[in-house]
Image: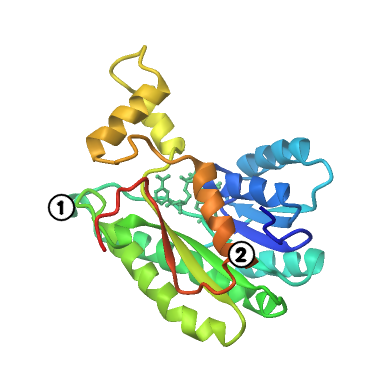
Amino acid sequence: MNLQIKGRVAVVTGGSSGIGFATVKLLLAAEAKVAFCGRDRGRLASADAALREAFPHAEMLPYCCDVLDPQQVGRFAQEVGREFGAVDMLINNAGQGYVAHFDATPHEAWLREAGLKLFGVIHPLQAFLPLLEQSDIASVTCVNSLLARQPEPHMIATSAARAALLNMTLNLSNELIVKGVRINSILLGMVESGQWRRRYQQRQDPVQSWEAWTAELATERGIPMGRLGKPEEAAQALLFLASPLASFTTGAALDVSGGFARQL
Ligand code: NDP
């Protein structure tokens, strides 16, 4: 299927690993120009090297930037504007979750989670909006979690912050569409990531394969598809919403949870 993004410009926050990295790869495969950021220079350099090997003719811009620092994000946007001009797709992916029940969640963790989930989107949106407004297919697509609608007690702060982000993106959709910008989200369940790889290293049965271990985890958690999602599956959903294939969709949240969602 033609995603209609050849030669178009995408920005991916948290593009050096996991879902963000898979998204950058899909964008480059569709011949888009891609700028992506992360905080760790080493991880960014490794991602850049792997991408240049896979896509030797691609136009891309890796940039070291913390999305929680508005000055850094502002400089990132300036650099993207200088290098590529207008931005067609902003994909807000940077972040991580916080695992703890209420009685083990300190004040700072509540603030950190709320800050990360909201300002991780607010800062890039503020910085890139003038460049998005120059595009005729502008979109913002946010990685969110099913926790926004289906909270879990062992991730109480993340669940609350995810719900706030979902609320904000729906609210923003009316204001942004006046400027010609669509905004949508994906709601993830459990996706294979560094976090799960690290837990696998500590498994009780040393001969158990990754596939068997993740299948057991998925069954324990009640994921009907019986496995975790793959970063590429999250990336495909992001690309659909970001591309002109979703040109009449804004304010939407697309479930990517392997059937884990339990609301109408
Ligand atoms: P990874 O840890 O593999 O990737 C996270 C990426 O974000 C890295 O590139 C990381 O680079 C970057 N990043 C993190 N914080 C910042 C920051 N403040 N500024 C800039 N970059 C940052 O995780 P995943 O791919 O699994 O997760 C991607 C998104 O999906 C996250 O928002 C996560 O919360 C969400 N999600 C994931 C789920 C899962 O099961 N995997 C489930 C639900 C939601 P660096 O550390 O170098 O900055």
Spatial CA span between label 1 and label 2: 45 Å
Question: Label 2's element?
Answer: helix
Report the colour scheme: rainbow
Residue type pointed to by label 2: Leu
Question: Label 1's element?
Answer: helix
The picture quadrant where one finds residue 158 is bottom left
Quadrant placement of the C terminus: bottom left
Residue type pointed to by label 1: Asp
Q: Position of residue 21 (x, y in %)?
A: 60, 45
Q: Is residue 52 left or right of residue 187?
A: right
For mark 2, what is the residue? 245
Q: Is residue 253 left or right of residue 18?
A: left
Q: Residue at x 61, y 57 (%)?
A: 12
Nearer the observer, disc 1 or disc 2?
2
Q: Position of residue 184 (x, y in %)?
A: 49, 68
Residue 108 visible in the snapshot:
no
Q: Position of residue 170 (x, y in %)?
A: 41, 75
Label 1 crowd bin: few (<14), some (14–19), many (20+), radius 10 Å: few
Furthest-left residue in this view: 103
Q: Residue at x 25, y 60 (%)?
A: 263
Q: Which mark is residue 103?
A: 1
Quick check: marks 1 and 2 in contact, CB under 8 Å?
no
